[in-house]
Every structure is written in C-alpha cells, then in structure tokens.
Amino acid sequence: MKNWFPLTSYDFYAYLTAGMVVLAAYDRGFMGSSLAYQQWTVAGGVFWAAVAYLLGQIVAMPSAVLLEHLLARRFLRPPTDIILGLDRPRWRERIIARVSGAREYEPFPAANRTRILEKLGKALNVLPTAVEGEAAFECAFPHARSVADSATRLDNFLNQYGMCRNVSFASLLAAAILGLSEWRIHDSKTTAFAIGALILAIGLFLRFVKFYAAYARELFRAYDKCAS
C-alpha cells in the first residue's frame, strides 16, 4: 500500500473486503439497501468503512478456525506435509488440486524432498524420516524470510490467501443472511444474490487452498536454496 494509506495491504485485502461483503449482505437483506442508495458523505464513508473493517476483524476469527485449521489442516492434509512428502495426497487432496488448478499443492520432486528433509533433520537434530510438518515449517520460516525476493513473494501469498479465506467465509455468512431474508420476503433478486454469494464462497475457498499451498511451497523452495 502507499505510505499515505492508513491500512496495510493485509488490512485492506483480508479485513476490509470481508467486512464489506457481510455489510452489503446485511444491507440488502435487512436494511432495504439503504446504504447502497444513500447519498454518501466523507464522514459517512469513513464511518461505514470503519464498521466494515471491524466486521472483517470479527469474521477473521471463525474464518481461521473453520476454513484454515479445520478444513485446510484437518479435513485436508496440510500443504507442508504434501509438499515434503510426509503424507501422500488422498483423493480429496487430488480433487482439490485439480479443481483449483493448484499445482502448488503437489509434492516436490524426490531429489528436492530428500535434500530439504536432510537439512531439516540436521537443523532439528532428528532423523530426516522423523521430521514433522509443523516443526519443518517453523525451522524453514526464518531462512525464507531472510531472502528479500522470497520475503516479498511470501507477503503476496499471505495477502492473497488471507483475503480469499476471509472473504470466502464472509460470503458464506452473506449467503446465509440473504437466504434468511429471502425466506422472509420472497424476493427473487435476493435469491440470486444468495446463490452468487455461495458460488463466491466456494470459488474463493479453492483460491485460498492454492495460495495457502503456494506460501508453503515458496517457503521450502527458499529454504532449499539458502539453508546450509
């Protein structure tokens, strides 16, 4: 972001955007689209942007718990485990990788995996076959962040997967809000918006998985190059 902009890139992408989605759905469903059609002033715009930002902060909590830690790390195997070959991809990981176009959610070539695991084993003082995914990530992280190019790429992937994760969950909330409103007033446009929000939620979850895996892949690619 520009130096004069009051929010960081992550604030804007991951919080403000998600909050705007929820606020827009609530406005459509329960406020008669009053926000969408009102004459905006600078003060009013700043106020509602602040409300959206705060909503985005709240949405980020269940988003991280449900989409990242439950779905992406429990229902699916963590990207680190797949990339390093610590676990083999099952049918669900293969389907997600195919549907999302996430080549990043595939194992490294065998030679790279062996070299990285040997370095990790030495750094962690364990056998390469005993390296665990979480410990590998923590070990590789400072090495990758010390490389300027990789640090920039990691920041970009963080912004992307944070936004996709939070806005995906916000879209699920929006679909629920709009669905409840449609049940009350039976408005065809609201139904269309609800369906659109649900499609957006699914699409952005797939993008989240792609960028989440890309983050881990970049981390270990940099570690492979810079670690001794």
Image (cartoon, grey):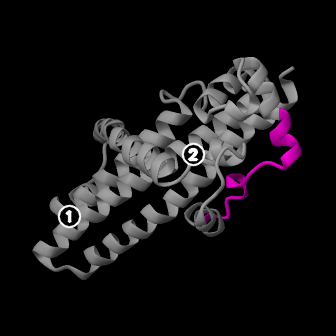
Residue 90 at least partly seen: yes
Return the residue nearer the eye: 177 or 88.
Answer: 88
Which residue, given by chain and number where applicable, does mark 1 sit on? 29
User: Helix or strand or loop: what does disc 1 sit on?
Assistant: helix
Q: Residue at x 64, y 57 (%)?
A: 89
The part of the chain drawn in magenta is 100-115
Query: Is 102 situated left or right of 205 in this image?
Result: right
Which residue, given by chain and number where applicable, does mark 2 sit on? 78
Q: Position of residue 206 (x, y in %)?
A: 54, 60
Q: What is the chief secondary structure element of the magenta stretch?
A: helix
State yes or no: residue 110 in magenta.
yes
Tag 2: Cα neighbours inside 10 Å, few (<14), some, or many (≥20)? many
Return the residue nearer the eye: 67 or 148.
Answer: 67
Q: Position of residue 96 (x, y in %)?
A: 58, 64
Q: Residue at x 81, y 29 (%)?
A: 118
Q: Position of residue 181 (x, y in %)?
A: 17, 68
Residue 141 location, quadrant: top right
Return the residue nearer the eye: 53 or 88.
Answer: 88
